[in-house]
Image (cartoon, rainbow, N blue to C red):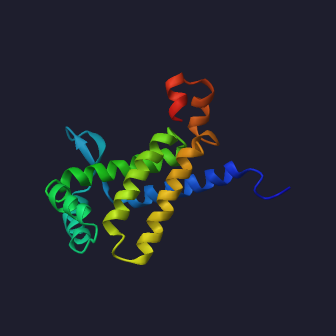
Amino acid sequence: MPPMVHADRWVVLLRIVVGVWFVKAVWTKFTLAFLWDLIPYPAVSPRFVAFHPKRIAEFAAGNPVEWYKNFLEGTVLPNSKVFATLQTFGEAAVGLGLILGLVTGLTALVGLFLCLNYGLASQWMSFGQQGFHVLLVTSMIIFLFARAGRTWGVDQIFARSGPRWLRLIV
């Protein structure tokens, strides 16, 4: 039997590995906060919120993509706390969505958006950054069009018996 008979299973392996990478990347950006000093909930780490503007300024400093540099300096930097929060929760959603195969089409779109932005921000810093983000963008496109959550994922359940609108996005 040829080794690639079940190509969908190899896509699942890639989906889970990329999901684990996203969870690993977001792990230190979260902390626990408490509502009424009683109910814990995930919150963005104050350390990450403090670090975020420095990193954005670094990304913008020598960025050769002028319109993106202007976006970083004019929009992201002044609203750094908002973007740190969006980045943290976006990475967590992508990581968990890919690992579980949950609404994988939408998850892949969010991941594609994040990876394109990371790539545009950091691609000029090193050749390795360029290659890494190209691989992530390519992976997200594969997950999107291969409907990667339908094999060994929660999307498999939705695809069989979910409402029609949900079957279209999984």
Q: Residue shown at 42%/70% (left/top)?
A: 130
The quarter holding residue 54 reads bottom left
Across and down, in percent, residue 123 comes to 36, 70
Identified at 30% across, 42% down, the residue is 41
**Viewer-nearest residue: 75 or 39:** 75
Does residue 141 lie above or below 153 as drawn?
below
Q: Determine the image quadrant of residue 61.
A: bottom left
Residue 47 at x, y percent in the picture: 23, 62
Q: Is residue 126 above or below residue 121?
A: below
Instruction: Judge from the rendering whether residue 1 lies leftward or rightward of residue 109; answer left or right.
Output: right
Residue furthest to the front in view is: 66
Q: Position of residue 82 (x, y in %)?
A: 21, 50
Is residue 152 or residue 42 the one in the foreground?
A: 152
| In the image, residue 107 above or below residue 10 | above
Q: Quarter of the image containing the N terminus? A: bottom right
- Where does the C terminus fall, quadrant-wise? top right
Vertical placement of residue 50 versus 114, above or below: below
- On screen, residue 167 versus residue 113, left or right, reads right
Q: How many marks?
A: 0
Q: Position of residue 25 (x, y in %)?
A: 40, 61
Residue that appears at 50% across and 34% down? 169
Residue at the limit of the structure toward the right, as seen here: 1
Q: Specify the farthest residue to the bottom.
A: 126
Which one is nearer the viewer's eye here, 127 or 98?
Answer: 127
